Image (tube, grey):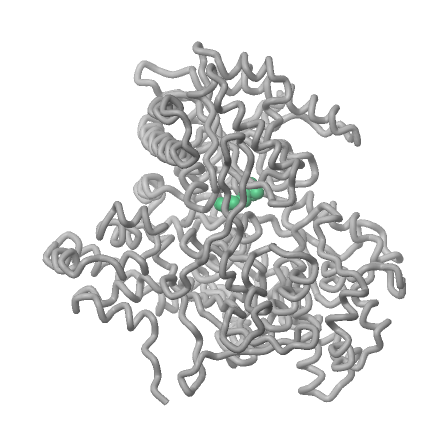
Amino acid sequence: MVNHPSPAAQLSLRLPTSLKRLADLAYNYWWCWHHEAVSLFVMIDPVEWGRCSHNPIILLQQVSPDRLTQLTCDPQYMKRFAQVLAQFDQYMTGQDTWVNQSLSGVSDKLSSQHPIAYFCAEFGIHESLPVYSGGLGILAGDHLKSASDLGIPMVGIGLLYRQGYFRQRLNREGWQEDYYVDAPFERMALSPVTNSAGQPLTIAVQVRTRQVQAQIWQVQVGRTRLFLLDTDIDGNDPIDRWLTGHLYGGNQETRIAQEILLGIGGVRALEALGIEPAIYHLNEGHAAFCLLEVCRQTMQKTGQAFYDVEKSVRERCVFTTHTPVPAGHDVFSADLIDSFFANYWEALKLTREQFLSLGARRLGDPWEPFGMTVLALRLCRNANGVSRLHGEVSRKMWNVMYPDRSEDNVPIGYITNGVHMSSWIAPLFADLFDGYLGPNWQDHMHDPKLWEQVDQIPDQEIWQRHQILKARLVAHTRSKVRAAREGRGEDWSLVNATNHLLDPSILTIGFARRFSPYKRGDLLLRDTEKALEIFSSTDRPIQIIFSGKAHPADEEGKRIIQRLMEWCRQSDLRDRVAFIEDYDMYTARKLVHGVDVWLNNPRRPLEASGTSGQKVCVNGGLNCSVLDGWWCEGYQADAQGRGLNGWAIGEDAHTSDQALQDKIDSEALYYLLQQEILPLYYDQDANGVPHNWVKMMKASIKTNCPAFNTHRMLIDYVNQMYVPHSLAKVELSLAKV
Ligand SMILES: *Cc1c(COP(=O)(O)O)cnc(C)c1O
């Protein structure tokens, strides 16, 4: 049997000898958080780079041989290429990692043969790999990137969706239309995993009466490997080929089948790959069936019964819950479980009742549906929420499972989310920090002392860079809005109006996230008159950019978007309000790089953590947010209750009257805008530098960046979740990488 060359080797065939290793870079997402590596691709063809969704594989497959030859003769380019390659090789082979320095005691338990297996239904690594929908996926992507940076042995397990998450288009009525686009797997940074005979490695799971085969693809994320399962292969029933068609699409039956593939298939994939995880980390309940398969596998190996292996399995499994809303947790009816698992509980030598009991909140309650969070809480050693407040809410919510414990003693802790700073910082700001914090600041970003040095950056310098990024955001917004208006055949005057949409000198607010009703995307419009007064002011003008999708089934979310679109068209607001369609990681980056203020006004306590506001901090943006999720821990005020590093909107009225709470919060928001935010922003010196504003930017950077990054988060996970209790607790130094 002939071994097919890897996709990277194939791609390199069309590159000149001295540029062949561009293919290695293109097939490792390491490039996307190293700005010099990104620039290597941009320089090949800046226009084409934009057109191909910043996908270097497509770029390199299309670039003309002439252009490549030209580059080989460009000493600047070749020098940069050599530098990036050296940095890449050093990164991939270097032994001087945080793990090797700080965790030597456990590194034999946790190794590349025995990594942490991180299961998630979605991964947001980069916009060119569209297998994410929002916060959960981006968090998972950032988790893998930080694990790679810190040298923590980890592999990711997920699904490869042919059409990913739905795409958003707004019609002339401002109504969201959903559509799907095929992802070109052969033109993405994916390599099929092959067996020793050079054939694609596959695994099988049983879905009802059928055996469904899934191919395993590999995505390289720095040192971390991400394995994605794909059922769209020859030999599968046509229906099963669509099993991995859509992320969070379909009905309950699709959902349970996908979760069987992710959980049970994921464990089988690891086995087929020869990987024996030290720890299984279930990021959200979708993958919880994995626990059953680990039990089955262990029973097979040891010959023991389910209740004998359960304890040792629990030692190896940890779980993170993400949803403070009961309805947000997956549950399946007993009927559905019957039709999918009748064979499976036999393999576990359990009765139907015993099996159903694993997913019932109250043991032995036959009326309970089968809950994935319940299953995960039952069979995992540790569980955590994603912010301090979310930990509390989760303990309360799941107290019912632990009738003999008080709420405080429900075994769910918390680890507050963070973001992978290197992925979310603008190159212009990274460069500024290189100068003032030292060139290796990205290796020490969880060290508060490091960030004290931002005080040394002259106000003028930080402000200038921020203004440039804001101007780029304005340009991005104009081009997206223009394309959307042209696309729906709007009147030419409306198309041309995009030429004066937004103005970089004006205070700019960003609001981008899923349009779920609880996030209250239109809270600002609650009092239309007041909103008009603020937004049509010529004296201290203000502008806002919205972006985000509503779930296809969420009519109320779609109505909120429609209201915002109406607002965008109102003649006196036209230049001050914009909506960017089809929110993705690229638009997210543009927004967090360029906004002055990031607005977040969910109904408390429904935002488990939120991460978008953390992405703003490292770029000097300020948060104006309801005290929910991470902001409860980030926000700092002075003795008079005035924000030092951002603003807190309203207060919790502890009422179930939503209209009342909306009124309180919107009025607080209007007050903050008029009395604090606008005056602070427009208090500028002769050069247009708002010194007090810049002071707050610096305070936000100093206080938020060391805490809300995924390096700190991963270290917390290692310390609290990954290092098995049977091992001596390792003293972890925070400042050392
Ligand atoms: C960060 C991010 C999110 C999460 O935003 P929240 O405000 O935390 O919900 C969602 N989508 C994209 C594209 C992001 O980059």
For this view, does 243 lie left or right of residue 688? Answer: right
View extreme (left): residue: 73
For this view, does 643 lie left or right of residue 378? Answer: left
View extreme (top): residue: 539
Q: Looking at the rendering, in which quadrant would you find the N terminus? A: bottom left
Numbered marks: total: 0
Image vertical order of residue 294 relative to residue 143, above or below: below
Q: Looking at the rendering, in which quadrant would you find the C terminus? A: bottom left
Q: Quadrant of residue 18?
A: bottom left
Image vertical order of residue 95 relative to residue 57, above or below: below
At 83% from the left and 58% from the top, the residue drawn is 401
Q: Quadrant of residue 574?
A: top left
131 and 155: which is toward the camera: 131
Q: Position of residue 620 (x, y in %)?
A: 43, 34
Image vertical order of residue 492 relative to residue 266, above or below: above
Q: Position of residue 413 (x, y in %)?
A: 70, 53
Q: Position of residue 308 (x, y in %)?
A: 78, 80
126 and 390: which is toward the camera: 126
At 48% from the left and 31% from the top, the residue drawn is 579
At 72% from the left and 59% from the top, the residue drawn is 373
Image vertical order of residue 479 relative to residue 234, above or below: above
Q: Quadrant of residue 508?
A: top left
- Asked if residue 457 shows in the view, the reply is no
- Asked if residue 270 shows in the view, the reply is yes
Q: Position of residue 538 (x, y in %)?
A: 43, 11
